[in-house]
Image: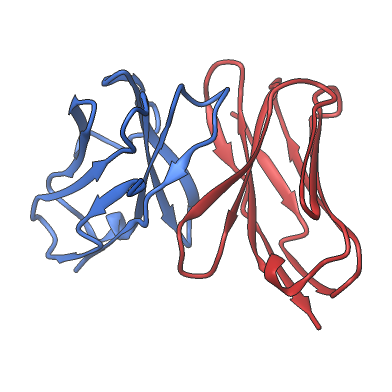
Chain colours: A blue, B red
């Protein structure tokens, strides 16, 4: 199994630009999670999906962030417009059934730098 | 607001010694998770603890949950160098809020 795939691995952009991060979960997994990690704020859960439906997006920082999961094998996290404080490592994870009952498998992360 | 406090934040151990990392949280929850992160790498899920008194063990690591005390522990037995990493706990409150601890950076020295 290829594991969770994220792209790009690194992204450098300028303030005000749109950024799209992509994630392909493990085949057969029904839940997908987006996390953000920074030195200042640590690890944060941004949003999670179950069966392609957003279940909890209370961690999404503001309206500039949006996430979609159009099908079971693909999700995007979009930031528009990006700001320097969005610089972070963004992780995607998937699990078979969801948070409470199952192990999550993490992708390698996307390191975003907003200049 | 849910708060999660880990301690210690930094831990330097000798190989072969035992130690415990603590994770305290501020609100009612019976769902707690432990993760490991190697430097510059992604996260690895270690344990999922879902009820009061839950205990799980994997190799030299054992995690437990006391929901009444709002405390989870991660016990390291006879540490080896390969356990050097940062360990995070995360708590999911009963209203689905989720917070991570700041992490414990563990260094095991020969």
User: Where is the C terminus of chain A found, in terms of image quarters?
Assistant: bottom left
Is B93 in front, or is A115?
B93
Horizontal side of A98 relative to B34 (left or right) equals left
Residue A66 in view in this figure: no
Q: Quadrant of residue B89?
A: top right
Q: Which residue is nearer to you in this view: B5 or A103?
A: A103
At a point 55% along the width and 16% down the height, the residue shown is B95
Q: Which residue is drawn at 12% across and 65% down?
A: A14
Q: Nearer the viewer, residue B109 or B98?
A: B109
Query: Is A11 situated left or right of B51 in this image?
Result: left
Would you identify the image quadrant in which residue B84 lies? bottom right
In the rendered view, tell whether residue A113 sits above or below residue B67: below
In this rendering, is residue A54 above or below A88? above
Q: Which residue: 12% across, 48% down?
A: A81
Q: Nearer the viewer, residue A107 or A2?
A: A2
Q: Position of residue B49 (x, y in %)?
A: 70, 30
> In the current view of this chain or complex, which residue is farthest to the front?
A1
Task: State the image coordinates of residue B36 (x, y, percent, origin top left).
Answer: 60, 54
In the picture shown, does residue B88 fall above or below A9? Answer: above
Question: Where's residue B85, x and y in %?
Answer: 63, 65
């Amino acid at each position: 199994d290829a594991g969770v795939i994220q792209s790009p691995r690194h992204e450098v952009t300028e303030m005000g630009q749109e950024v799209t991060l992509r994630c392909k979960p493990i085949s057969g997994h029904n839940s997908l999670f987006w996390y953000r990690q920074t030195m200042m704020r640590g690890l944060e859960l941004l949003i999670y999906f179950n069966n392609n439906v957003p279940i909890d997006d209370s961690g999404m920082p503001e309206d500039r962030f949006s996430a979609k999961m159009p099908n079971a094998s693909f999700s995007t996290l979009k930031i528009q417009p990006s700001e320097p404080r969005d610089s972070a490592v963004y992780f995607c994870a998937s699990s078979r059934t969801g948070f409470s009952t199952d192990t999550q498998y993490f992708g390698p992360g996307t390191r975003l730098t907003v200049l | 607001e849910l708060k999660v406090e880990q301690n210690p934040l930094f831990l330097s151990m000798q190989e072969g010694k035992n130690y415990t990392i603590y994770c305290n949280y501020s609100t009612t929850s019976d769902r707690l998770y432990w993760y490991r992160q190697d430097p510059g790498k992604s996260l690895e899920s270690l344990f999922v603890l879902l009820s009061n008194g839950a205990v799980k063990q994997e190799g030299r690591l054992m995690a437990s949950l006391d929901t009444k005390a709002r405390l989870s522990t991660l016990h390291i037995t006879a540490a080896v160098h390969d356990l050097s990493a940062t360990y995070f706990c995360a708590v999911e409150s009963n209203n689905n809020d989720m917070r991570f601890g700041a992490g414990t950076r563990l260094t095991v020295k020969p």
